[in-house]
């Protein structure tokens, strides 16, 4: 199981459900746009603190980012 891909898929689904662009999500989470794109593509390995920032920006809990 590739956890980077799982987190990336969940971030993308939550972002799209909220109607946000990657740029808007990056701004809300205080992250770089290219970093968010890398997370969504499963190429980056976000730290717990990054996942917390993403979850807050998405109005979700961290557990929603790691669900299979």
Image (cartoon, rainbow, N blue to C red):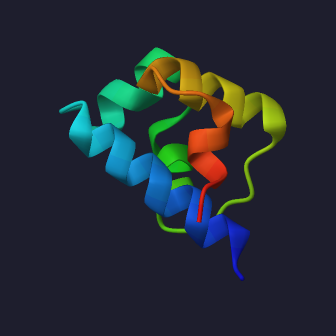
**From what the image shows, is residue 46 above or below residue 28?**
below
Q: Is residue 11 left or right of residue 1?
A: left
Residue 58 percent location from the top left of the image: 43, 26
Residue 28 percent location from the top left of the image: 44, 16
Residue at the spot x=18%, y=33% of the render?
Answer: 19
Residue at the spot x=69%, y=27% of the render?
Answer: 52
Q: How many marks?
A: 0
Determine if residue 37 is in view: no
Determine if residue 34 is in view: yes
- Quadrant assignment for the N terminus: bottom right
Looking at the picture, tell me which residue is in the foreground, 18 or 34: 18
Residue at the spot x=34%, y=51% of the render?
Answer: 13
Q: Quadrant of residue 59?
A: top left
Looking at the picture, tell me which residue is in the foreground, 8 or 21: 8
Q: Is residue 57 left or right of residue 18?
A: right
Residue 56 percent location from the top left of the image: 55, 18
Looking at the picture, tell me which residue is in the foreground, 57 or 28: 57
Residue at the spot x=66%, y=34% of the render?
Answer: 62
Q: Is residue 34 left or right of residue 63?
A: left
**From what the image shows, is residue 1 above or below residue 45?**
below
Q: Quadrant of residue 51?
A: top right
């Amino acid at each position: 199981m590739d956890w980077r891909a799982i987190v990336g898929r969940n971030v993308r689904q939550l972002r799209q459900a909220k109607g946000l662009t990657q740029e808007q999500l990056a701004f809300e989470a205080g992250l770089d746009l290219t970093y968010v794109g890398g997370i969504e593509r499963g190429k980056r390995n976000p730290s717990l603190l990054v996942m917390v920032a993403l979850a807050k920006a998405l109005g979700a809990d961290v557990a929603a980012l790691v669900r299979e």
